[in-house]
Image: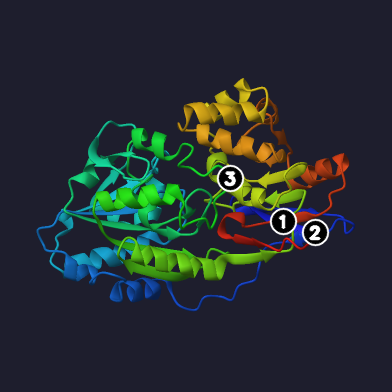
Amino acid sequence: MKIKVPYGNDFQEAEIPDSVNTEIIDPAVAPVKKSVEAFIQEALDHPIGTPRLEEMVVPEDKITIVVNDQTRPGPTAQMTAEIVKRLKGAGVPEENITFVIATGSHKGPNEEQLHTILGGLEKRMKVHVHDCQDGHHIYMGRTQTYDVPIYLDEFVAHSDFIVTTGLIAPHHSAGFSGGRKSIVPGVVDLKTLKVHHSLPIRPYEPAINFFEGNPFHKVALEAARLVKVRFILNMVQDVHKQIAGAVAGDLEEAHNAGVEICRKINTVEINGRADLIITSPGGAPRDIDLWQSQKALSVAEMLAYKKGTTFILVAEAKNGIPQLFVDWMTAAKCPEEVIERYRQEGFDIGTNKAFMYARAMTKGKIILVTQGMTEEMAHRCMLDWAPDLQSAINKALAEKTPKKAIVLPRAVNIIPKINEAE
């Protein structure tokens, strides 16, 4: 069987012997005929739970539009263009509008990436790139759930009207992305993230589709309500990254409607678990680094046996991974030590990924196919490495014959529904 897995802007190709029971999870989807602009306009014309955006603002309002950073694929330029058009139609001058790039704890975009995000608006309008460690945050209060302190980027805190934009997709900690995530983690201080992103608020196991009752989600929603997000515009992608829906309006009501669209179009039935799982985030920009690419491992974990699984993570990851991840992994004698350290010390930039890679390693071994880490460094981090996908498969098969193999070319866009009878 020939397989083809996204890798950066290209693919890795390989063959798996016919003797191996292999299931490729890459469902075909029909081309979406409606344009992205049509989805956006329809959502803004029929908001859920609020009046239209242009009916909610006055010309004097200082308006902040929060947008995703370069690690989140989506039609941000089209969304922001239509939002600005409607705000100007309501009499709001451009000088009263600021874009805030919701980086969370990521690095900010470079000039080219910023242009991709905003499509030229950055040349004539105010843009602020959030930095969770710059000290320019304002205390807004605490959430009732888990008593999390919310320190908000001052550019957002000083606005009269907050609009958030984003993408609703399956998410390994929050259940689904979008909505409230524009605020937490998008534009808050590291002090907030250190509480919110640690156990037990962060679910221990992968939380894709765990939405109702998820403390990670509940705290973020309370925080977004606390800072008074007034309006959202979120897009929904299908498993092949086509825009297949859009929602606008109330922070919670509109997002919930988008989650239901996502569940409907992204849930995929899978015939049982596997002990060889080849997984990819789906190529650029989702595999920009090994931090983002780890999300493909979370989906793979949901399909793995409790012990003895081999994971092959295919991710170009040109930008590598934070040094703190390397420090934690190289300091530990076994994955369990990393997990216990995370229980004790919690989140910092890179430690959450050390925890998540270690969590997968308690279920089996990980072979990286990546530019983001050398073979020598991978071995120091208790990981395996191969120069290409075929070599990784050959290495896995040389060690044992799997009961079953699963291939996930676009892992992060799917919601697995496992048929346990297999």
Q: Can residue 132 be seen in the rendering of this structure? A: no
Q: Nearer the viewer, residue 42 or 141?
A: 141
Cα gap from disc 1 to disc 2, whole angstroms: 8 Å
Q: Residue furthest bottom?
A: 33
Q: Tags 1 and 2 in contact by the CB under 8 Å rule? A: yes
The quadrant of the rendering that contains the N terminus is bottom right
Q: Name the residue rendered at 13%, 57% in the picture.
A: 61
What amino acid is found at the position of numbered circle 1 in the picture? Val
Q: Can residue 208 be seen in the rendering of this structure? A: yes
Closer to the observer: label 3 or label 2? 3
**Secondary element type, mark 1:** strand
Closer to the observer: label 1 or label 3? 3
Mark 2 highlights which residue?
22
**Secondary element type, mark 2:** strand
What amino acid is found at the position of numbered circle 2 in the picture? Thr
**Secondary element type, mark 3:** loop
What amino acid is found at the position of numbered circle 3 in the picture? Glu
Of label 3 and label 2, which has the lower sequence position?
Answer: 2
Mark 3 highlights which residue?
205
Q: Name the residue rendered at 46%, 58% in the picture.
A: 212
Residue 352 on image: x %, y %: 51, 36
Mark 1 highlights which residue?
407
Q: Is residue 22 above or below residue 106?
A: below
Q: Is residue 188 left or right of residue 282?
A: left
